[in-house]
Image (cartoon, coloured by chain):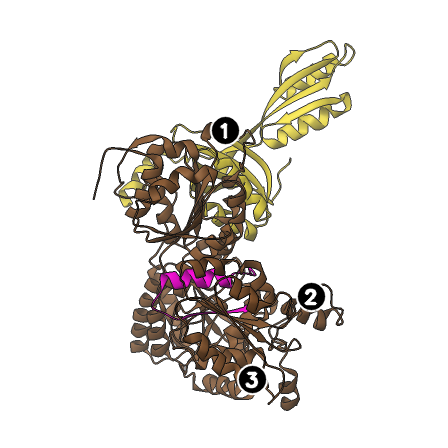
Amino acid sequence: MKPTGKITGAQALIRSLEMEGVEVMFGLPGGAILPVYDPLIDSSIRHILVRHEQGAGHMASGYAHATGRPGVAMVTSGPAATNIVTPLADAYLDSVPMVVITGQVPYAAIGTDAFQECDTVGITMPVTKHNWLVTDARDIPTIIREAFHVATTGRPGPVLVDFPKDVATQMMDWYWPDGVDMPGYKPTTKGHPKQVKDAARLIVAAQRPVIYAGGGILKARAADALKTFAELTGIPVVTTLMARGAFPDKHELCLGMPGMHGNYTAITALQQSDLLITLGARFDDRVTGKVGAFAPDAKIIHVDIDPAEQGKVRRPDVPIVGDCKQVIEELIKATKAEISKHAAANISEWKATIQQWQLDFPLYYEQEEGGTLKPQFVIEKLRENTPDDCILASGVGQHQMWASQHWQFNYPYTWINSGGLGTMGYSVPAAIGAKVGRPDRMVWAVDGDGCFQMTAQELVTAAAERIPVKIAILNNAYLGMVRQWQELFYEERYSEVYLSPDLPDYVKWAEAMGCVGMRCDNADDVVATIEKANAINDRPVVIDFRTDYREKVYPMVAAGTSNDDVILHPALNEKSR
Amino acid sequence: MAYNARHHILSVLVENKAGVLTRVAALFSRRAFNIVSLAVSPTEDERFSRMTIVVDADASPLEQIVKQLNKLIPVIKISEIAHSEGVEREMMLLTLKAGSETRSQVTELSSIFDAKIIDVGYEAMTMMVVGEPDKLDAFSDLVRPFGILEMQRTGRIAMPKLARQPVKLRAVRAARG
């Protein structure tokens, strides 16, 4: 596997990508990256030609979420590089492994304000785990090896390699490095034995423990370990927005999503807990609410591969730096050893309390017969009429929260969304990337009408490449989440949130992009419409569901307030009084 | 810049590569941390550079700064040099108004502070002071009434204090492992 001889930098780049096992890349060519697109013709790598560079980035991200392999995108210099900054920032906040290659003006022209020049390395420094400017073709295999290593190990994240045009045409002697030599990069994966033992002691003694599972579970491929650990201890699990599917929703120990729009039980269980076993989560402000009032009585065990997360928001009693899967396996052993010495505390009363909350404060909405279509109803029917392992992508806003709340996730890697950055327009390209990575799975996206208008053009890509994703637009004619905040916190003064239900005409737009377009505006037709969409497998489908614009996302913890102050659905509030 | 409990000296060993200073500086601004002073130079090993960064922060944010810095790939090692456990030096260049009537007073003060006069004009003098930051502060305070025309300071560099145990004790400790 070590071909030798003189080749161009461009050939070396493509060959290096092949050596890294890249099967698919998402991209769009242009001036500075032209030399690299030539050897691509002879490569085994499938290239998906996007319509906008942002699409390439989010597709790579969706691909990485669905497969666990790094997503690869390649675009040219200047505006192409700036267009892919959003996906980089998105992937950085959600720790998605991605390798982005950008073209650059010839090395000698850097700094001269040449055509389509921008300081890509400088611009992307704060939104990548690391980035490189290639200055010599001889460095290409080493840099690509390092880039994939950095993207996929430790806390995963996006990296960028900036590739000047003259480096692409420079000749080099091909080689492939045996490994990487990076003295400043050595992630810790094994938990400290003493800390693990201390954690086990706390776990066994806790009266009101909760497992607070975050996206790190999925990144570490630790879903099975988590299940074993939860079942061993009988401790209930909350799954954050980034961890939906990491623990099956149908499992009796699963409490679902905590946070600003989490369910009452998950929020309150965290809040009243005496021990949070935090696994690959980062005390995000959307989970904690007002930090000072968050889980005031809880001791904290914090397992995270990134040492900088320890104590960033909440000081842990037992910090454990390491890979979630390895540490959970170590915790299982240590907990078993601890239980063999003395029985674990009885947590049945705690679990009974939790069960009562689940009964008293369920997620709530009401689909009136013949009434306006409720978005939650659409999601429930979608769930009921798709395979259990169907992959669901979403954009950002109300529809995202409803999707996370009302979809039952029973498998890891079936939920793809933009959690940290909150990137509107994420779902269409992310769903396409996911479908490319998992053609064996059905892939749906639940999108908002606002989000859809931001990246819909990638459905042209999907139609051209025959990638049959299915998009359910919950069209409420508003920037719904912003409207909700204006209604609740700005005295119903609606400022710049109205979009119109039929401008654009989503059905015609879908058809124009080579998709099948459908419309559904009443509850009776929802299932039939979904079934029709499910039967189409040769092109993308877009459904324009006309939903109730007045519907709001509940429960809600208002920004900056304590998780003790959960605002329930008004109808539930009346019941509980 | 007198001793300040919020000031922490970080000695950061980094790979001697293009753009490393930008990465470090950008990290400070992105995470909203304040740099008081920064000195960079190559080390005895040409593959590495050393940055001496004086940070203005409380202890808890400082921990975040160190951890975030550690995440930068070209950063090899970070050590905090506590005020009591290090030797610190800084250099200052200072151009003072010094006409014929005040020149002798300025020279006198300079000799007390071991300041070197490195340039002399008709109405001004430039001098160099090396020492602990406190000493530099004191000197600039004292000469301010004469009129400071220009002043530059390098920022601190620091090294850990050397252990000074008697040879015998060292041998005993080594034997104990």
Q: Which residue is mark 3?
A: A523
Q: Chain of mark 3?
A: A
Alpha carbons under labels 1 and 2: distance apart: 45 Å
Q: Residue at x 44, y 60 (%)?
A: A462
Tag in front: 1 or 3: 3
Q: Is residue A340 above or below residue B62?
A: below
What is the letter of the yellow chain? B
How many numbered dots are placed on residues in this image?
3
Question: Which amino acid lies under the numbered mark 2 shown in the image of this protein?
Answer: Val
Question: Mark 1: few, some, or many residues within 10 Å (few <14, many ≥20)?
Answer: some
- Residue A572, horizontal then vertical, whole percent: 62, 86
Q: Where does the C terminus of chain A fall, quadrant-wise?
A: bottom right
Q: Which residue is mark 1?
A: A109
What is the letter of the brown chain? A
Element assignment for label 3: helix
Look at the image and give the residue range highlighted in magenta: A421-448
- Residue A325, horizontal then vertical, whole percent: 34, 64
Q: Is residue A344 above or below residue B141?
A: below
Q: Which label is found at residue A497?
A: 2
Q: Does the magenta portion include A539?
A: no
